[in-house]
Image (cartoon, rainbow, N blue to C red):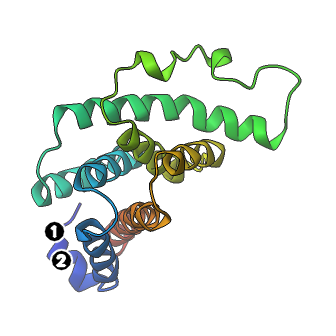
Amino acid sequence: MSDLTTLLNTIPEIQDQLTLFTDAASATAALSSENRDWVLWASLHAMRDKPLIEWAKKQYPEPLEAVKRGVLIASSRMAVTNPYFMASNIQPLQAGGSLEDLSMRPFSELQVQNTCGYHYACIAISVVNGGFVCYNSHLHSLRQEGESDTAIDQALRMVASLSSIRQSIFNADWLI
């Protein structure tokens, strides 16, 4: 990734997305700071963009070990469930279609300390992956845990702005 200052000089529109991300990540009204960490690091890992992860490491403190572990669990599980349920939703089959068919351990056995954070990580990853069946499932779980639409929207704005920053960085490499 080119230096961010160089990118901003080349593509000033990146600043719009950086502002959107900063505003969403720093808002204090809805999404807790721990859940923001879940969204940030889950989004970055789902995007699989090492330069963007390195940028984030310079901007934000390293997440707690419990967050790191939970994001890795969410990432690996969504890597299985997102494509599986997306495909089976498009063209239903007369076989399979459940977590048990994917040999997924029950969530209760995973020992994730912050279930709400985990569900935020899953919606972030599902948005990046286009796994909307999983997105809907985890959105429902967040609402059952009492999370507001405002908090969920804040998380979605973080994911969307990071996605746009990633795309702009890719585009800049083509222009520079």
Residue at (24% x, 35% y) in the render: 68
Residue 22 locus on image (x, y percent): 25, 72
Label 2, residues with CA under 10 Å away: few <14, some 14-19, many ≥20: few
Residue beneath label 1, please? 3
Can residue 147 be seen?
yes
Residue 131 locus on image (x, y percent): 60, 45
Label 1, residues with CA under 10 Å away: few <14, some 14-19, many ≥20: few
| Camera-nearest residue between 64 and 4 | 64
State whether residue 153 is above or below residue 102: below
Residue at (64% x, 16% y) in the render: 100
Three-letter code for the amino acid on which mark 2 is drawn = Thr
Based on the displayed image, in which of its 4 quarters is residue 46 positioned?
top left
Tags 2 and 1 in contact by the CB under 8 Å rule?
yes
Question: Dividing the image into 4 quarters, which one contains the N terminus?
Answer: bottom left
Residue 106 locus on image (x, y percent): 52, 18
Between marks 2 and 1, how big is the CA–CA gap?
Answer: 5 Å
Question: Dividing the image into 4 quarters, which one contains the C terminus?
Answer: bottom left
Residue at (45% x, 20% y) in the render: 108
Residue 165 locus on image (x, y percent): 35, 68
Based on the displayed image, in which of its 4 quarters is residue 14 positioned?
bottom left
Residue beneath label 2, please? 6
| Camera-nearest residue between 140 and 45 | 140
